[in-house]
Image (cartoon, rainbow, N blue to C red):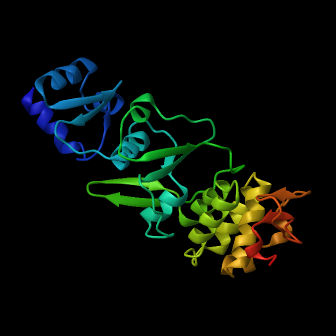
């Protein structure tokens, strides 16, 4: 049994969660997993989830298991994806917050939700795009890799979080650092985005900060809907995009 666990640990990246589904592919049955827990080699996180005894596993190591073992379409997005890429602005908080995204209708498993990861987790799984846009960022941790949103996709996820004046200002601060958004990808996202509000906000912020992509996208091909949209009451109504935002962003 010792030889088998040693072989397993060689293939198990430190700092990550291992799911029983993956252990099965390594020849470790559920019964044997329980024996390893009793022997002190493994610690059980929840149903079908384990860590090495004595190992320190953070939320990134849990995302690794969701992506590589459970094959869930879940990823760090928005401000978290930007931070992983060294982009965006510092967010002062008493407790670190991470933004996770998933494909429409997806859910986080109980072992992940019930675990204290030392961060506040916000999970969103809307149908933000009508079709897949193949674009992501590989974040390298010591010994393993997870997929996160590219800076282009993360910018849309940021805009999705805007619900009022405070969140608008916070997202606007993040946008200031996004000077290298790729026009071709941004156009693809604008065409595929299902939210009229998000598309209008993206164009407004891109114009406000004079970002190159906003000057190059073909706006005639982007469906911006009809009618008005409101982020704040008694704000400034953009004359072309017909969305009401804080006055300091154009209305004086």
- Which image quadrant is residue 200 in? bottom right
Please state the horizontal and vertical placement of residue 220, each as a whole percent of the image. Answer: 86, 69
The quadrant of the rendering that contains the N terminus is top left
Point out the residue furthest to the top here: 31
Check the image and report above or below for 113 versus 236.
Answer: above
| Residue at image coords 38%, 37% | 69
Please state the horizontal and vertical placement of residue 215, each as a whole percent of the image. Answer: 74, 80
Tell me if 185 is positioned left or right of 148 in this view. right
Tell me if 221 is positioned left or right of 63 in this view. right
Q: How many marks?
A: 0
Point out the residue furthest to the right here: 227
Please state the horizontal and vertical placement of residue 94, each as a whole percent of the image. Answer: 41, 55
| Residue at image coords 26%, 54% | 143
Please state the horizontal and vertical placement of residue 169, each as a whole percent of the image. Answer: 64, 66
Front residue of this view, candidates 242 and 151: 242
Front residue of this view, candidates 41 and 164: 164
Residue 25: tell me if it is visible.
yes
Check the image and report above or below for 210 versus 103.
Answer: below
| Residue at image coords 67%, 81% | 212
The quadrant of the rendering that contains the C terminus is bottom right
Check the image and report above or below for 136 versus 236.
Answer: above
Check the image and report above or below for 10 versus 140.
Answer: above
Residue 136: tell me if it is visible.
no
Tell me if 61 is positioned left or right of 79 in this view. left
| Residue at image coords 37%, 46% | 59
- Which image quadrant is residue 152 in? bottom right
Front residue of this view, candidates 185 and 87: 87
């Amino acid at each position: 049994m010792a030889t088998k666990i040693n072989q397993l640990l060689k293939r198990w990246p430190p700092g990550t969660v291992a799911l029983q589904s993956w252990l099965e592919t390594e020849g470790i049955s559920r019964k044997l997993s329980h024996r390893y827990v009793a022997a002190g080699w493994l610690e059980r996180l929840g149903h079908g989830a384990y860590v090495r005894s004595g190992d320190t596993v953070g939320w990134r190591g849990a995302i690794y298991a969701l992506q590589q073992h459970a094959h869930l379409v879940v990823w760090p997005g928005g401000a978290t994806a930007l931070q992983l890429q060294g982009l965006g602005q510092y967010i002062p908080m008493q407790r670190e917050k991470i933004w996770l995204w998933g494909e429409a209708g997806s859910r986080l498993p109980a072992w992940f939700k019930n675990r204290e990861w030392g961060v506040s987790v916000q999970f969103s799984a809307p149908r933000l795009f009508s079709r897949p846009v193949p674009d992501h960022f590989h974040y390298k941790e010591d010994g393993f890799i997870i997929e996160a949103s590219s800076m282009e996709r993360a910018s849309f996820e940021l805009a999705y979080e805007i619900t009022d004046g405070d969140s608008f200002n916070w997202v606007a601060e993040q946008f200031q650092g996004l000077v290298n958004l790729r026009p071709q990808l941004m156009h693809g996202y604008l065409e595929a985005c299902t939210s009229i509000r998000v598309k209008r906000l993206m164009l407004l912020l891109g114009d406000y900060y004079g970002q190159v992509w906003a000057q190059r996208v073909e706006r005639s091909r982007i469906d911006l809907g009809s009618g008005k949209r409101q982020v704040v009451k008694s704000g400034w109504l953009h004359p072309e995009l017909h969305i009401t935002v804080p006055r300091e962003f154009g209305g004086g």
